[in-house]
Amino acid sequence: MMTVAGSGRSGKVALQRRRARAQALKYLIFLGPAAAVYAPFVLLPLLRTFRLAFFDWNGVSEEQSFVGLANFTRAFNDPIFWTAITNNVIWVIASVVLPMSAGLVLAVLVSSVRRGQRIYSGVFFAPVVLNLIIVGLVWGLIYNPLIGPLAQFFRAIGLDGMAQGWLGKSSTATPAVIIAGNWTFFGFCAVIFLQGLRSLDTEQIEAATVDGANAFQRFRHIIIPALSDQVTLLIVLSIIGSFKVFDIVYVMTGGGPNHASEVIATYMYWQAFVNGRQGYGAALAVLLTVLVAGASIALMRRRERRE
């Protein structure tokens, strides 16, 4: 009996092993082509960037001098680096508040419309697919103090003092670029929120209405909690997008004037490819990666603890 039982267990183990190998083979078949592309074009450059962060290299010479943590120490003592981080944090806050608020309001308004929801969604989503370089060029014309429509509007209503070079002043360059960048994101937020609103329990809203809850109370206590998953998703995307923003800042201000609108990505580019400090630029890239990953992981863990 023991022999039969033992052979039965060994047969089950062998069967489980065969199934595990078959499952692993399926994973390899489906993930292999993607991994073959990902490894040389993403993973390998990432590892080289991490390595380069510990060296001093001008990008041309064959010699790379090992400097240890000197590039990171330099970054922490660099006032422009802290200006760039501050601007990235401002981008995060603005990207969470402005497009998400506008997107939520638009989603609520569209959800109350019985016909044409897809048309409205398509119109709101259109800016999302635009190239940010084109968006930056167009908004640069809008902000033009001489021929821009914004300046002409202020002059038409008698506010000549507001017809100024918004991108040429240290105090207004960052807010002006943030408005242009967030203009492309509100439609995405609206579409995401609209999909969440379609899955709401209408009976719960009707019951709250019968109990005397007004529109604001229904919005605060029913709609907002029901959209928590969408809010988390959009916040994570806002954090990632705000920390890695580059193209629209580079096109509109180049990080100026006097580094006032600098973000980590533009400062990293400026150091690595303009000043020829590849090692320092790589260190900035590593710090940017750590910031994005840390902020995203912290937000997701907080979300999990709440659940």
Image (spheres, rainbow, N blue to C red):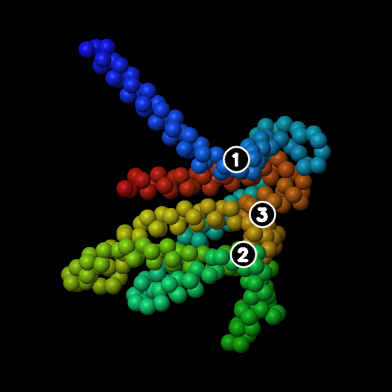
Q: Which residue does the numbered mark 3 point to in the structure image? A: 266
C-alpha span from label 3 to label 1: 30 Å
Give the x, y percent position of residue 160: 64, 83
Q: Which residue does the numbered mark 1 point to in the structure image? A: 36
Q: In terms of depth relative to the viewer, which is nearer, 91 or 199?
A: 199
State the SS at label 3. Answer: helix
Q: In this view, does 186 lie to the left or right of 261?
A: left
Residue at the left extreme?
211
State the SS at label 2. Answer: loop
Callout 2 crowding tier (Cα within 10 Å): few <14, some 14–19, many ≥20: few
Q: Note whether 241 is above or below 191 in the view shown.
A: above
| Numbered disc in front, either 3 or 2 | 2
Q: In terms of depth relative to the viewer, which is nearer, 307 or 36?
A: 36
Q: In terms of depth relative to the viewer, which is nearer, 199 or 227?
A: 199
Assess whether mark 1 and mark 2 are in contact (beta carbons under 8 angstroms): no
In primary-sequence order, the first of circles 2 and 1 is 1
Q: Which residue does the numbered mark 2 point to in the structure image? A: 131
In primary-sequence order, the first of circles 3 and 2 is 2
Q: In which quadrant of the rendered view does residue 77 lie?
A: top right
Q: In which quadrant of the rendered view does residue 54 lie?
A: top right
Q: Is residue 261 left or right of residue 10?
A: right
C-alpha span from label 2 to label 1: 28 Å
Q: Which residue is drawn at 72% across and 48% down?
A: 271
Q: Which amino acid does label 3 sit on?
A: Thr
Q: Which amino acid does label 1 sit on?
A: Ala
Callout 1 crowding tier (Cα within 10 Å): few <14, some 14–19, many ≥20: few
State the SS at label 1. Answer: helix
Q: How many marks?
A: 3
